[in-house]
Image: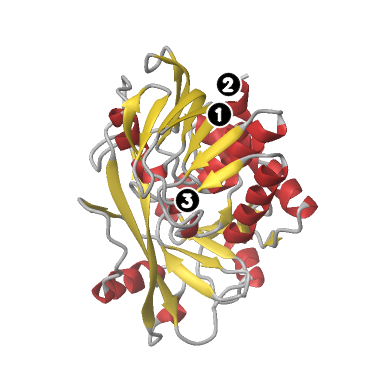
Amino acid sequence: MIEQADCVVIGAGVVGLAIARALAQSGRDVLVLEAGNAIGTGISSRNSEVIHAGMYYPTGSLRAKLCVEGNGMLRRYATDHRVDFKMVGKLIVATGADECDALQGILTKGRANGVSGLIPISGERAKAMEPDVACVEALWSPDTGIVDSHGLMMALLADVEQAGGQVALNVPVIGGSGTELRTGGSEPMTVKARNVAIAAGLSSPAVARSLGLKAVPCDYLCKGNYFSVLGKSPFSRLVYPVPVKDGLGIHYTLGLDGRGRFGPDVEWIDRESYEVDAGRAAGFAASIKRYWPGIEGRELVPAYAGIRPKIYGPDEAPGDFEIHHGKAHGVLGLVALYGIESPGLTSCLAIARMVAEMMS
C-alpha cells in the first residue's frame, strides 16, 4: 500500500508531538508515525520532569538558546492549556570551598545565556530556605520548575488532532529513501511525504541510517537511575550539586505530588535496559550525603530509570543538540533531530518552532 502525505513526523514523544502541533497549526497536513503502542513511552516518560532555566549549557549552543526560549513558551502553554506545573525553584549548592569557582562559572554562563532571576546566595540563606541542606554557597534559580509531562503530551496531542493531524501507533519506520518511508507493523505501507521530521529519540540515528541519510552521528546509550527515599521528603525545592562529568550530578527533584526522588546518575550501557540495580544505592547515598547529611540511616529504594540519547561517548566532550536540514544530510524537505536529551522537555516548543520554520 502506498500513501501520500504532506508532513510526516517520526516519533510521538514530547518533541515529536510539539513539532506535529506547530506544523498542523500552520495549516499543514500532518501524520505522526509512532513505533510504540502509546505516545511518549520512551525518553518523554522517563525523566525528572524538570522545567530547566538554561544556566548549564555553552553560550550560543542550541541547548542554551532553545532551553531559555522554551522555558517561557512551556510555562505559557501549560498555563493556557491547564497542564499542571509548579515553579518550585532550584538550589545549586557548593558543598565545599573547592566547588565555589564552579558555582561562579555556572552563574556567569547562566547570565550570558539570558537566564532570568539567577542569583548567588550564602550557605546560611540556603539553609534558611531548606533547613536540611548542607552547603557553603548556592545559586538560587526561581525560573526552574516541574511539569506533568504526560499532561503536556496529552495537551499537545489534542492540539494536533484539533488542527486535523493524525497519530498512528504501532507503525515503526523500518527503511526507505529520504522522504519515502517504509513502515512495519501489522499493515506495512510506503509513505511518500513532502516533508519529514525524525524525532524518534533513542532511535533517531537508526531511522536516519535506514533512510540513507548522510552525516548521521554515532549514538550511545547513557542510563540514568533514580532512587526514592523512604519516609518524609527532605526538601521542598529542587536541590542540585555542582555538575559532574557527563551529567548534572545526583540531584533531588520533586514530583507534583510532593514526593522526592534522587537521580539520575551516569551509567553507560550497550543495550536498552530500564531495570534499576538496588546495589547502586550505596553510591547514591555517598553522593547525596555531601548536601544532605540527614540521609544517614534513611533507606533508598529503586524508583525508575531513563536513557539519555547521547551522540558523544564517555571520553568525548559534551555535545549539542543536532538538528540537520537539507544539505547537512543530502535530503531536501527532511529535518533530523539527534541527541535531544535534557533540556529537550523544556525546549520542546522552541524546537518545534525551529523545525516548522525549516519546513516552511
Dot 3 or dot 2: first in sequence order is: 3
Nearest the camera: 62 or 44?
44
Mark 1 surroundings: few (<14), some (14-19) or many (≥20) residues within 10 A:
many
Nearest the camera: 234 or 146?
146
The residue shown at (53%, 65%) is: 253
Do the numbered discs 2 and 1 sit on residues whose CB atoms are within 8 Å? yes
Q: Which quarter of the rendered picture does the N terminus lie within?
A: top left
Q: Is residue 301 visible?
A: yes
Nearest the camera: 92 or 336?
336
Distance from label 3 to label 1 (Cα)? 16 Å
Which percent across, then down, holds residue 225? 35, 64
Q: Which residue position is annotated with label 2?
A: 359
Q: Which residue position is annotated with label 1?
A: 7
Do the numbered discs 3 and 1 sit on residues whose CB atoms are within 8 Å? no
Instruction: Kindly state the secondary structure of the residue where label 3 is placed.
Output: loop
Name which residue type carries label 3. Leu
Distance from label 3 to label 2 (Cα)? 24 Å
Q: Which residue position is annotated with label 3?
A: 169
The residue shown at (39%, 36%) is: 189
Which percent across, then down, holds residue 112? 60, 32
Q: Quadrant of residue 177?
A: top left
Instruction: Kindly state the secondary structure of the residue where label 2 is placed.
Output: loop
Instruction: Kindly state the secondary structure of the residue where label 1 is placed.
Output: strand
Horizontal side, residue 58 vs residue 115: left or right: left
Name which residue type carries label 1. Cys
Name which residue type carries label 2. Met
Q: Is residue 217 visible?
A: no
Q: For the view shown, which residue lies furthest in the right direction? A: 80
The residue shown at (31%, 19%) is: 214
Mark 3 surroundings: few (<14), some (14-19) or many (≥20) residues within 10 A:
some
